[in-house]
Amino acid sequence: MTTKTILIWACAVLFSITSSSFAKNTASETLPPKDSIYQLQSEFIDQDGRAFKLSQLQGKLQLVAMFYTSCKYICPLIIDSARGIDKALSKAESAHLRVLLISMDSARDAPSVLKAVALKRKLDLARWRLARTDAQSVSMIAALLGVRLRALEDGEFNHTSALVLLDDEGRVLARTEKMGGVPDTEFLAAVKAALAAQVKSN
Amino acid sequence: MRMLAQILALVLLPTLAIADAKWVELPSGAFASLLKYPDSQDRLQKVSAFALMNVPVSNAQFLEFVQANPSWQRSNAAWVFAEPAAYLSHWRSDLTLGASVLPQQPVTFVSWFAANAYCQAQGARLPTWNEWEYVSAADQSHADARTNPAWQAEILSWYAKPANTALADVGAKPANYYGVMDLHGLVWEWVSDYSAMLVSSDNREQQDADQQKFCGAGALSIEDKQSYAVMMRVAMLSALEGADSTSSLGFRCARDIPADTTLGNP
């Protein structure tokens, strides 16, 4: 072992100890690439009240969508769409996929509200995460996902809908705006191809 | 202590003069938006009192910002936040403007994310579209001059100018009724809710296509078709993505005015 590799190793150990407290100034090795939406530093909170940053999602393929719980019309359909993709996968495939549903309703979607929806919709919380963040971060993640939204006076939202597939470092691999329980075949093919590539590389 | 501050101010003034953003306080009010909001009964949009920079952010000011925030320098900025080939592409390098880019020209080639970051660093935010439209309705002597044909013609003359004309310095033209400059005739400006402008590319499709595309009450539509200037802005903003930047798109910041306080200028 050369001095250099020992140094790198020592740094890595030191880094793993300190990284949790210095999440913002982490060393370049865990920093997401420049074309990754995990560059967003915002803090999210999931249905179980756990705080996280998008960069912590590195390592698995992610299916991401935006929704809000009180939406009556298309939002249940957004969850159906994500589930439609998930159900079209084999057990072996879906084991490598994570699903993240981000609420656009910062005012009303508290973790407990998200949890209630997750339970009601019987979402597999080992692989699915429902999350909320502040209003400013909502507009930023929406911009990164290509979702357009506007808060209406009555507390509802006017918005476009998208399912976005991110690679293990948070780069956009594919997206679809076709919503419904029957998956968009082109998008499903992209998900399957990405999962196959992921399994191969592991 | 106070004297020291005054001496410091005098010493620092020549270098800081460029970075001083003058904040103009805007009174609260209601105005008839040219956009028709499907969730509003009437077109009167209420705007709370807020403060707005009197001119767009200049190259010199943005340079100071990237000096203090290296992650927003051209070669460092994340591509998801600022399209790499376009962001500050007119500057000579990360920290030099170059001969053809003047310090007092409005900064352009900035993405919405970068504009947001700049305003946040000033303890401010981007104005909303509503705020921008409210202030931009004024001419030099009226809060709402939008029905004045002479003023309409003046705004339209800007669109007739070739796009390759060099940008004027910020604040070169007279202030409007509120004391705000360059809302028309210099650059397009980012607003915080640019992506909320769910305007159908073809308003005739409003009833069908958008009902599928947009959850909720449907897209906004433009009420006054003769308001070409506003239509242009809305169409342009609604076509943009947050990482986009163009040669004629700049920004200025706004901030809330806490109730019962007045805002001092720096």
Image: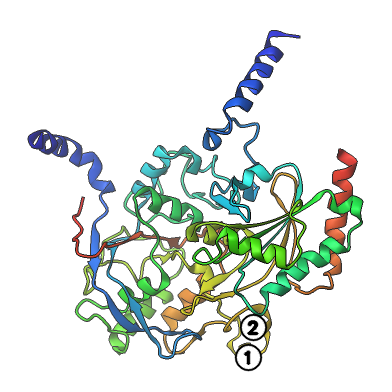
Q: With respect to residue A160, does B1 lie above or below?
A: above
Looking at the image, how many numbered discs can be counted on the residues? 2
Q: Position of residue B220 (x, y in %)?
A: 52, 82
The residue tagged 2 is: B210
From the viewer's side, name the closer residue of B177 and B39.
B39
Q: Is residue B238 left or right of residue B33?
A: right
Distance in Å between CA atoms under marks 2 and 1: 6 Å
Q: Could you tell me residue B100's position as x and y percent?
A: 41, 49
Q: Are marks 2 and 1 in contact (CB under 8 Å)?
A: yes
Task: Inspect the image, locate mark 2, and give the three-letter code of the amino acid beneath it.
Answer: Asp
- Residue located at (25% from left, 49% from top): B20
* Residue annotated with mark 1: B207
Quadrant assignment, res A67 = bottom right
- In the picture shown, does residue B209 fall above or below B10? below
Mark 1 secondary-structure assignment: loop
Q: What colouring style does the render use?
A: rainbow
The kind of residue tagged 1 is Gln
Foreground: A182 or B72?
A182
How packed mark 1 is, by other alpha carbons closer than 10 Å (few <14, some 14-19, many 20 or more), is: few
Of B201 and A38, the residue lying toward us: A38
Q: Tell me what residue is drawn at x 71 percent, y 68 percent.
A: A120
Q: Is residue B84 left or right of residue A61?
A: left
The residue drawn where x is 55% and y is 36% is: A23
Q: Is residue B123 visible?
A: yes
Q: Is residue B208 found left or right of A89 in the rendered image?
A: left
